[in-house]
Image (cartoon, rainbow, N blue to C red):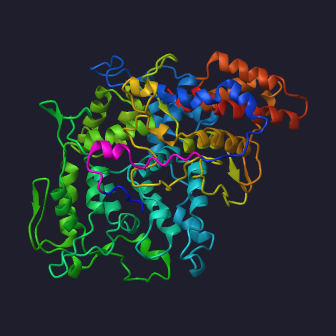
Amino acid sequence: MPYDVENAENAEDVENVGDTKKKTNSNSPSSLVSPITAVGLTAALSACGGGGASDSGGTVPSGPQPDPDKQKITDEQAARFLLQASMGVTRTQIQRVQSLGYSAWIDEQFSTQGNGSRWDWLVGKGLDVATYKNSQAGFDPCAWRKLISSPDTLRQRMTLALSEILVVAIQGLVNGGGWKGFAAANYLDLLEDNCFGNYRDILQKISTSTTMSLYLTYRGNTRFNPQTGAMPDENYAREIMQLFTIGLLQLNQDGTPVLVNGNNIETYTLDDITGLARVFTGWDFDLTLSNTSTPDYHRRPLKQVPLKHETGSASFLGFTIPAGVSGENALTMALDFLFAHQNVAPFISKQLIQRLITSNPTPAYVARVAAVFNNNGKGIKGDMKAVIKAILLDDEARSAVAPSDTTRGKIREPMLRFLAWARSFNANSASDTWLIGDTSDAGSKLGQSPLRSPTVFNFFRPGYVPPNTAIANAGLVAPEMQLVSESSVVGYVNFMQTVVSGGRGFGDLKADYSGLLPLADNANSLVAEINLLLAANQISASNLAVISNAVASLHTGTDVQRLQRIYAAITLILACPEFIVLK
């Protein structure tokens, strides 16, 4: 069940949920993995604890920040920006950033159109027929297709980030209806369509989404029955507070906990959950124009069934919705109240910073972004465009980070490592089938796959601290480390080695290495170019030397041999600590 920790009502309980690390046996690494371990594969994941800034680390200017667009942007700076703001780096995008500047590039991305919806792709493939009603058919291909090939690369990055905060998982779409592939595709389309809008609108959209209603089980939720004692389902009432708006603890605007006599203050109680749950009654599929024999109803918002809606008053967090208010108005009032809560700005802003920039942003960074979340300069709260700009253009995002600084940056989650390769080398499926599949298995694949989180708490918790590590000793968090296991370390490299070389098992997914072929005879030049595109020149000199020497030991002279060099160089860099930890 996706909500298997529904009774976790304190921070300690929440931080320990969803830890689904597997330690399964995997196939022995192939011969190419040997030089990878020489580069430090094992250290790559254990050293990743340097991926973040402690709340006390670094001096952050309190006044106006310098405008980086007024300075010449180097290849390295542009690449680093793109690793934070997009799905991957290409020479074309580097040049575009240098030509426009950071801010104007973001503006251009705001208006860049994608390559069609996931829903329409599924329909185009003929998957909207009864044969596929009870399957997930087509979802993985349509999800990967957009992440890899859609030109609106910032929009795709934000869609993925929001999907890991406002979590839905396709395997958890229970409570009837069918058409899981379409329901999941439509949820990603919904996030994509609204990720540059207003966060209040996003809350409205997800709360009336058939997909969310299935995942958090409030579809068909009915009012209190005094005869049977049946109570409204409380799942969504709990999670919209705990995960989507205000969190567990009262926060200052810099994201630090409010303390009274040294103690944290909880944001809500069980009574608040019970009260809010009354709002999420009476919501069901809108089958006015169709029935469940087609997936079309998943594209329409939920509708109210008045006979099932709680007609009495609903009280939560000190706010009361009077008796007799319609279900639609009750929802509007509840969401408006939650959105107005002081916690929303720091709680959501910090998580977005973590998804894009650094695992441990300083309180000053969080405060600057939260201030923009609260007011975009025109008196509007929740303007996602303004928030995105504030995150990406902040001095903590744009200033250089010394290699020795273990307090800034973040571990790249496995999906982003794979997508960095796919985007940098224009991976494509000529037949438009995108047969990458579900990559959730840690022993043989990525240990992560779009919209397949094991719980509503995402693949990893934003406050996760790997126990008995230098990270914990330094008082830092490393969310993505929750995905790391003995199996996942080797499984990731084996998976990437296969996909990089165009190995079997991925249909006709192929990368374009034509830009690297002219460099392949010179190992140093080849490795330097890959270092720029995949790691923004963050690979250490010692690791670059090891990789270059390994590549130079391979034969060259023919294009087949050059490609072998390219495969080796890319795979070795993908295993480097400095690639896995983005600073």
Residue 264 location (% of width, % of height): 19, 37
Q: Using the image, determine if residue 172 lies above or below residue 37.
A: below
**Does the segment drawn in magenta span residue 19?**
yes
**Does the segment drawn in magenta span residue 410?**
no
User: Which residue is located at x 30 percent, y 32 percent?
Assistant: 366
Quarter of the image with the N terminus is bottom left
Residue 292 location (% of width, % of height): 46, 81
374 left or right of 546 in image = left
189 left or right of 500 in image = left
Quadrant assignment, res 207: bottom left
Q: Is residue 405 visible?
A: yes
Q: Using the image, determine if residue 137 lies above or below residue 501.
A: below
Quadrant assignment, res 187: bottom left
Task: Give 277 or 18, whichever is nearer the viewer.
Answer: 18
411 left or right of 418 in image = left
Quadrant assignment, res 192: bottom left
Name the outermost residue toward the right: 557
Task: Give 173 or 323, whichever is nearer the viewer.
Answer: 173
User: Which residue is located at x 64 percent, y 30 percent?
Assistant: 41
User: Which residue is located at x 53 percent, y 67 percent?
Assistant: 181
User: Which residue is located at x 85 percent, y 27 percent?
Assistant: 554
Q: Using the image, determine if residue 205 lies above or below residue 495.
A: below
Task: Give 8 or 330, whichever is nearer the viewer.
Answer: 8
Residue 215 location (% of width, % of height): 40, 64
Q: Is residue 516 visible?
A: no
Residue 358 location (% of width, % of height): 43, 31
State whether the magenta stretch is mostly helix, strand or loop: loop
* Region in magenta: 7-23
